[in-house]
Image (cartoon, rainbow, N blue to C red):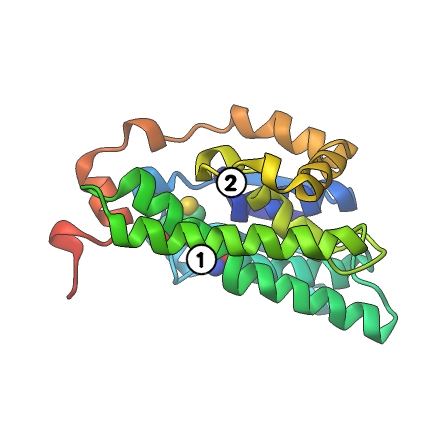
Amino acid sequence: MIDFYALTSPNVQKIFLMLEECGLKYNLKPVDVWAGQQYSPEFLKINPLAKVPAIVDHDGPAGKPYTVIESGAILIYLAEKTGKFIPHDPVKRYDTIQWLMVQMANVGPMFGQLVHFSKFAPQPQEYGHSRYRTQVLKLYDLYEQRLKTNPYVAGSDYTIADIAVWPWLRNHALLGVDLGKFPTVAKYIETIGAREAAKKVLAILPTIKSSRDNATDDNKDKFFSRGKYAMA
Ligand SMILES: N[C@@H](CCC(=O)N[C@@H](CS)C(=O)NCC(=O)O)C(=O)O
């Protein structure tokens, strides 16, 4: 059994999708990061970085419990555990890992910053908004070009590189991205969204309680490391 520490953000959705795709059993352990629960001493023992997702696999390597943090590492761990969604062929395998890293190193941080500067920054942030919007649009274009010649991000197979990027690409409305300009990405979002596992994830997400919409100012400051929590 796997303990899955989660809320509802795109990085968490990747792990929901992977667990559902692999048919793995899991105990959902909600961590309301908008109420500061990521800083509880119990959770910090699991992830000293104070972020979800994290998993504890009670049947880890050598049959012992094993903790994994960072969504990209969790996807690789679960793919290797099950032998699913990571090809054995070396070229396809490294194509998958490369495209997983493109998501982790670029899509997550840039999309996340655009959401921050458009929805959460305290006043209009023209420079931050323009910079991150440009980065996000460049990334949508990267996937548009890539998917014109490949059905899936890493090539011919549906892999953890797709499981990693789908939750972010489907966030186009929140990001203010006009999907009409990226028709191949639009079709790809729809194709993955039609998978049984994805439909299950979309049904689970609204059932998870989060205080995101009524977080206190203090919890927001703590979450964003600002105000009295700023260190510089
Ligand atoms: N690179 C990490 C990012 C995880 C992440 O940013 N999680 C957010 C989800 S909203 C979080 O837990 N934030 C709480 C905090 O920063 O205090 C991953 O891919 O797993």
Given the image, on which type of amino acid does mark 1 rest? Answer: Pro
In front here: 178 or 118? 178
Dot 1: few (<14), some (14–19), or many (≥20) neighbours within 10 Å? few
Compared across the picture, whether 43 is left or right of 119 comes to: right
Residue sticking out furthest to the bottom: 90
Q: Look at the numbered disc 1 and give the secondary structure of its residue.
A: helix
Distance from the alpha carbon under mark 1 to that under mark 2: 25 Å
Residue lying farthest to the right in this orientation: 89
Tell me if 160 is positioned left or right of 46 in this view: right
Q: Could you tell me residue 227's position as x and y percent? A: 13, 50
Q: Residue 82, which numbered label?
A: none
| Amino acid found under the numbered disc labelled 2 | Lys
Provide residue 48's location: percent of width, then percent of height: 39, 62
Q: Closer to the camera, 113 or 187?
A: 187
Residue for badge 1: 109
Q: Is residue 52 left or right of residue 146?
A: left
Q: Is residue 75 above or below residue 88?
A: above
Question: Residue, x 80% and y 59% (percent of image)?
Answer: 155
Tell me the residue at 58%/44% (across/down): 169
Among the two numbered marks 1 and 2 on one chain, the one whose residue lies closer to the N terminus: 2
Q: Secondary structure at mark 2?
A: strand
Residue 76, image x, y percentages = 68, 63
Residue tagged by mark 2? Answer: 29
Disc tally is 2
Say if residue 105 shows up in the picture.
Answer: yes
Horizontal side, residue 136 vs residue 28: left or right: left
Q: Is residue 134 positioned above or below 218 on the image?
A: below
Residue 123 placement: quadrant: top left
